[in-house]
Amino acid sequence: MGRADGPDPVPGAAAPGGLIPLPGFPIGGIDDGVVRLRMHADSDLEEVARLSLDPEILRWTFVPDDNSADAMATWLAEWRGRGEELHLLIADAESDRPLGAVGIVDADLDQRRCGIGYWLAPDARGGGIVARAVRLLTAWCFDELGVLRVEIRAEPENAASRAVAERCGFAFEGIARSWFTIKGRRADAAVYSLIRES
């Protein structure tokens, strides 16, 4: 991975492989008055593990099939150790009740781009919650990480995730064939992007 040419320095020090560690997320999280994005706390693990056992979440995400609070803690610790990813809780801004998760994946700040992934609990769906979360995190990526491109990649058959991308103004770029391995199988990816206009 080479260094992107551009007028603005990107925060962070270079890490192995050209990846740059993500700057710290605000301790109190960020919110729009309806949803709050914040770091996971140990007290969230049981509820997040329970919510993520929904068949649709297990079908389309990397959430472990044999989920439990312990498995969730291990999984989150593994992702945190990679440095180029950030996994956040989507919570109700008033009650702080967990509703789902959103995160930064495949961040390459050297090239000023990153991806966003998400899932939402069944009883929170249909009210635009995940779209709010995606908009919040995308704005934070542009403003705080200095990225110029944010991607959303979903399996072509994942109509709900694709609808969120379109609702948030991401442009469909096409199908990347055999893009990634998820739970032991190869899968295509519908690729969406949002470009920050300078």
Image (cartoon, rainbow, N blue to C red):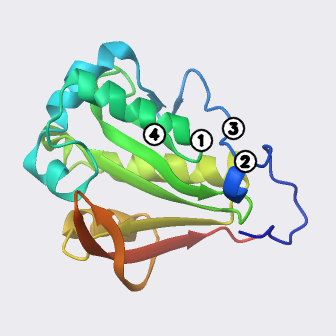
In 3D space, how far apart are the residues under numbered discs 3 and 1 (Cα atoms)?
9 Å
Marks 2/4 in contact by CB < 8 Å: the verdict is no
Residue 196 position in % (x across, y down): 66, 67
Marks 3/4 in contact by CB < 8 Å: the verdict is no
Residue visible at 37% across and 71% down? 166
Label ID, residue 15: 2
Q: Which residue is mark 1?
A: 83
Lower sequence index among marks 3 and 4: 3
In 3D space, how far apart are the residues under numbered discs 3 and 2 (Cα atoms)?
13 Å
Residue visible at 62% across and 27% down? 26
Mark 1 residue crowding within 10 angstroms, few (<14) / some (14–19) / many (20+) = some
In 3D space, how far apart are the residues under numbered discs 1 and 4 (Cα atoms)?
7 Å
Lower sequence index among marks 2 and 4: 2
Lower sequence index among marks 3 and 2: 2
**Could you say whether the residue bearing mark 2 is in a helix, strand or loop?**
loop
With 45 as the anchor, is 150 left or right in this view? right
Label ID, residue 79: 4
Residue 23 position in % (x across, y down): 69, 38
In 3D space, how far apart are the residues under numbered discs 3 and 4 (Cα atoms)?
15 Å
Label ID, residue 23: 3
With 93 as the anchor, is 159 left or right in this view? left
Mark 2 residue crowding within 10 angstroms, few (<14) / some (14–19) / many (20+) = few
Q: Is residue 82 above or below residue 165?
A: above
Residue 79 position in % (x across, y down): 45, 39
Q: Residue furthest right?
A: 7
Residue visible at 55% across and 54% down? 138
Marks 2/1 in contact by CB < 8 Å: the verdict is yes
